[in-house]
Amino acid sequence: MRKLLKKSFVFISVLLLVALAACSSNSTETSGKDNGGQAKGLKAKIGVISYLSGPGAAYGEAITNGFKLAQKEINKKGEVNIELVTEDSAGKQEQALTAAQKLMSDDDIVALLGPTLSTEMNVVGPEADLNGIPIMGTSTTAVGIPQIGDYVFRNSLPESLAIPASIKKAVDKFDVKKVAILYGNDDVFTKSGFDTMKKEAEKMGLEVLAIETFQKGQSDYNAQLTKIKGLKPDLILCSALYNEGAVIMDQARKMGIDVPFVGGNGFNSPQVIDIAGKASEGLIVATPWFGEKEDPKVQDFVKKYEAEYGKKPDQFAAQAYDALYIMAEALKNAGEADRDELRDALAEIKDLDGVLGKFSFDKDGDVVMDPTVLIIKDGKFQLFE
């Protein structure tokens, strides 16, 4: 019913626009066809909400770089011509919502990519769904994101799939019996990661010795780590963004805590190595992305990304890169730059071959993909075997 009402509204709007156009000799053709030497292919304007300033800006930088590289390649092919309009969320719910509202007010924008954090998506997703504009998270991994509404999708591997894979691998490798859990309790993403860690630990019959919390921007973890050290766990599970996570690992190693860490998706960034240095050794994460994979598609992407930005792509860049290709494929299948048609075409994406592997959406708009478990060893992410 809601979709029918939206289509009726669009139809009425189109009739009004046609009437207005008849009164003007300056109307512009916007059907997506080639207009007198302009770019060929179906034209579409897509809004981007990204974490570009503040302590987590490395996430946003990688994501927008991935979008821009994919945009350059897609537009060059000519089947689809995509314009990106980017707004900074600074990792804040209010700013993300304001950015989304600004982008959605532009009727030419047919979809949104982002925002970066799950806590941001929890306020932006419902607004996009209410307005009938498709939105795809490329880094939002908390439980329940696609279930926000029919117009909400993600191509980022949810923590509910990634964390169990990494915990199981660590438990089998190190014969783990006892664990301690640390998590940020003031963020939807890190809280969701904790919920998955606790559930999985209990499911596997592990003894949870301690559950300790912290907040964004915290710099001293002495109290939490002292308690954990005294309990002598075999493994530490930590749900954190890279800034706090790297500092936690650094302080833990300086205190003599040498057991492995299993991190949530927020740990899966080269920034952890940059900040924590040798203290990051032994961090285990699960991801759909591994840049050393011997796959021509993967290595071609790494080569192009390095040439463009002077650094190797991380998971967030790869997910963003694939996300724009998913959008382009859906636009081609929809045959027009229409929000409702694009939403339906996205829902039907199956087995699209990307740098992350074969990609499909399930019935909820969530990702269908197998994770790869990595460990930081010798200063870089490697396959954990």
Image (tube, helix red, strand yellow):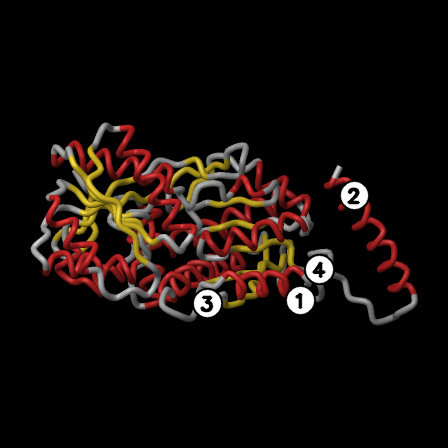
CA gap, disc 4 and disc 3: 25 Å
SS of the residue under disc 1: loop
Does the CB distance between marks 4 and 1 fall below 8 Å? no
The reply, left or right, for residue 85 in relation to residue 375 is right
Residue at point 52% right, 42% down? Answer: 146
Q: Residues within 10 Å of mark 4 (few under 14, many from 20)?
A: few
**Mark 4 or mark 1: whose residue is earlier in sequence:** 1
User: Residue 320 is drawn in which quadrant?
Assistant: bottom left
Residue type at mark 1? Answer: Gly
Q: Earlier in the sequence, mark 2 or mark 4?
A: 2
Q: Amino acid at mark 4?
A: Asp
Place of residue 194 in the rendered image (x, y in percent of width and height, measured from the top left): 33, 44
Above or below 54: residue 46:
above
Mark 4 lies on residue:
107
The residue indicated by pointer 3 is 90
Q: Residue at x 28, y 40 (%)?
A: 372
- Distance, label 3 to label 2, CA atoms, is 35 Å
Q: CA distance from mark 1 to mark 2?
A: 37 Å
Tag nearer the camera, 1 or 2: 2
